[in-house]
Amino acid sequence: MSKLLRANFARLLKSRLFWLGTFFMAALGTYFPIQNYNIMQKEERTISPDGAFFMFALIIPLILSVFCGFFIGTEYSDGTMRNKFIVGGRRITVYMANFLICTAAAFIISAAYAVPYLICGIPLLGTFNADISHIIVIMLCVLAVTEVFTAIFTLIATLIPNKANGAVSCILMGLALFISGIYGGLYIRSSLAADNLSETKREICEFLYDFLPGCQLIQLCNMNAVHPLRMFLYSVFIASAATVIGILTFRKKDLK
Amino acid sequence: MNKLLRANFTRLWKNKVFRGCIIFMFLDAVNTVISQYMSFKKYGGEKELYFYENLALGQTVAVSIIAAIFIGLFIGTEYSNGTMRNKLLIGHSRAAIYFSNLAVCVAAAILIHVVYVATTLIGGLIAFGSFFTQSDVLIKLFAVSLIVVTAFAAMLLPISTLIPSKSAGVTTVIMFSFVLMMLTMIINGGLNEPKVYEAYTIIDASGEEISEPEMENPFYVGGIQRKIYEALYDIVPTCHAARIQLDDMPENPAVIPLWSSAVIVVTTAVGAVFFRRKDLK
């Protein structure tokens, strides 16, 4: 496992796509506070750094969908996967090593946004309005939901050996979760705001609003998560379920 | 050229991705009609408003993403399966290959679009009993939307043709289309911001009068940025699609077809020239 992880990390650090994603997020993390500072100067009003800090939660799934599809797809197309089995790697180890490397990439890309944001944002916009404990809780939820996306993309990319088909499936899944999160979130929120909703329907809507990864993103990027603990646990559950399903299917898969 | 066209269309009819796109658009159309009809039954009101929201040309922007998936995979397969090499080996010119690919991609994009339009129109007619518009207006808008959809295909084809790696090509085409869609949302949102918020007075529950003076809208887009937004809103095909979809047509109705045609000509010329010079190994 440690050898696989080391090899994967070496590949990660040489991956152009990974660096492109990292630089893109770092550029966004620098742009948002500077842009808000310019507005603040022009309009003579205060903008706290809270507003755009968690915006990266919305973009990360799209970047991950491209990264995971390509990173794991290349293992098949370049024969890396076959080599790993020939030298005696077990399927569960290969799967977990890939999952962990995609998780590491996700966290590094997230940090690439958050760190420049804090470095530019706090001197320009001042300190956060929200409590530090609240920010940490939201950050943990964001990382957990990022883990959900990583688990889903790893599952898809590992089970589809054709690189192009795997990459397209990951991107489409990413877009579907992103768009359904925005529209589904708006629909559920408007349903919850209606007075005539029956108790059962209200409970279903509340559950979906906290359970679906896309809806979680909408709540987290605005920092207005009502049930953060529940969301965190749902994310852990979905990520674990996707990983277990992925490992079981991958173990039985005919890799030719 | 004829042989290339025949071969391409034979591949098109057998293509599973194309069939998948058609089925997706059909199901999307049926779902839209049913949900609009359910909303009408639940909330009542003017049938016309429900008909106009999302039916007929209400999904033109989405065609760009669906067409991108098809074009990326269809052209990428030409490279990965060696079809492109075979075509060149038996003596077809690169221009003929490019234009025959363009024809099949345009046909596919138009068919994907037409499936949605036809299904929602027939479904809407059954559910609401009328088209609620004069047929000539609908036909004109539909004709404009066909030019816009052609522009989508013409714009996406060069990207796919100039990237021989199937996976890289298809990813780039889909992401490009997605970025244009996001850009359209940003431009449309920015241009719709009012310059000032009107002054208003309301009386709250306790009978107290609350007044707010006229305020400048901080999100109003002005100056050079507005000019750039307006230019892009006139030029970019996904913005054209959004304008058709949102019934936000310019004062001069020729603007959209003319700019879309310009996009078709420029992107096709650029694509064909670069494809002729490309080292295909």
Image: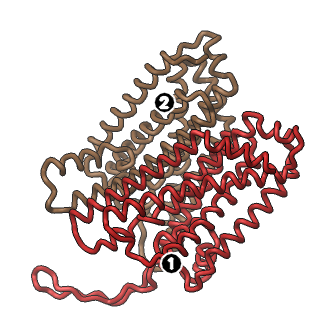
Chain colours: A brown, B red
Residue A182 sits in which quadrant?
Answer: bottom left
Q: Nearer the viewer, residue A90 or A114?
A: A90
The residue singled out by tag 2 in the image is A155
Q: Are marks 1 and 2 on the same chain?
A: no
Element type where label 2 sits in the image: helix
Residue type, mark 2 in image? Leu
Q: Nearer the viewer, residue B214 or B22?
A: B22
The residue singled out by tag 1 in the image is B136
Q: CA distance from mark 1 to mark 2?
A: 50 Å
Please tell me which residue is depicted at 14% across the width and 86% down the height of the picture: B208
**Horizontal side, residue B109 vs residue B1: left or right:** left
The answer to whether residue B11 of the structure is visible from this angle is yes
- Chain at tag 1: B
How packed mark 1 is, by other alpha carbons closer than 10 Å (few <14, some 14-19, many 20 or more), is: few
Please tell me which residue is depicted at 66% across the width and 39% down the height of the picture: B167
Residue type, mark 1 in image? Asp
Please tell me which residue is depicted at 48% across the width and 52% down the height of the picture: B25
Marks 1,2: beta carbons within 8 A: no
